[in-house]
Amino acid sequence: MTAEIKAYQNLSTDDFHDIIQLRIAVFVVEQNCPYQDLDGKDKKAFHLMLKNEEGKLVGTARILPAGVSYNEVSIGRVASHPDHRNEQLGHAIMTVSMQFVLEMWPECDVRISAQSHLCNFYSKHGFVKTGKEYLEDDIPHSEMLFTFNKS
C-alpha cells in the first residue's frame, strides 16, 4: 500500500474522479444515503489517497484546515473500498491523516463528525465523544474531538 496526500489543486482529474467515485460507492450507494457529497469543501482540503500495489484507490479521507468546518482541523469522508474491508485500511487512513495533521498544524486539535457506530473505531485513534449527537442524512452521528497534549 502507498499513501499520498495532496492539496485539491495538486490532484489530477483522475485522482479526483477516483476519490469521488469511491466516496459515492461507500456513502451514497452502499449506505443507501443520497446526499450532496460535493459541498465546496474539497477545494479547500487535502486529500489522502491510499492505493494498493496495482495503483487502485482503496481508501481515502479529506483533511480540512481549521476554520473550514470547525474551529479545529477536521478529518472526514473517511472511506475504504468494500472489497478491502478486511485489511484494516481505516486504521491506516486515520494514522496517516493524523501524522499529516501533526506535521502541518502542530498541536492543533481535530474535530470530527463520526457515524455513531464507529465511535469505538475513532476512540482507538485518540478521539473522545463531546456529547453532541445528531442525525446527519438520517444516520446517527457523534461529534468527537482529539486534543493534542499541549503541556
Image (cartoon, helix red, strand yellow):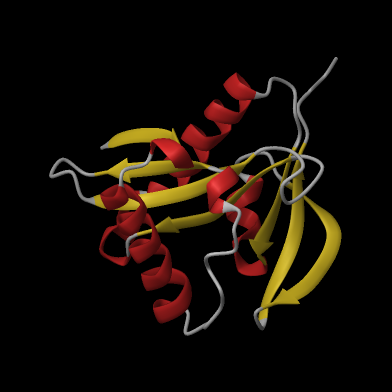
Residue at image coords 41%, 70%:
24
Report x, y in % for residue 66: 74, 38
Is 78 situated above or below 126? Answer: below
Residue at image coords 75%, 27%:
148
Most distant residue in the left direction: 54
Most distant residue in the top direction: 151
Left or right of 3: which side holds 79? right
**Placement of the N terminus among the 4 image quadrants:** top left
Left or right of 97: which side holds 117? right
Residue situated in front as seen by the camera: 86 or 144: 144
Residue at image coords 72%, 47%:
68
Report x, y in % for residue 47: 46, 43
Report x, y in % for residue 56: 21, 50
Residue situated in front as seen by the camera: 45 or 147: 45
Report x, y in % for residue 62: 53, 48
State the image quarter where residue 73 is shown.
top right
**Placement of the C terminus among the 4 image quadrants:** top right
Residue situated in front as seen by the camera: 124 or 5: 5
Is 75 situated above or below 83? Answer: above
Q: How many marks?
A: 0
Residue at image coords 54%, 48%:
43
State the image quarter where residue 19 is shown.
bottom left
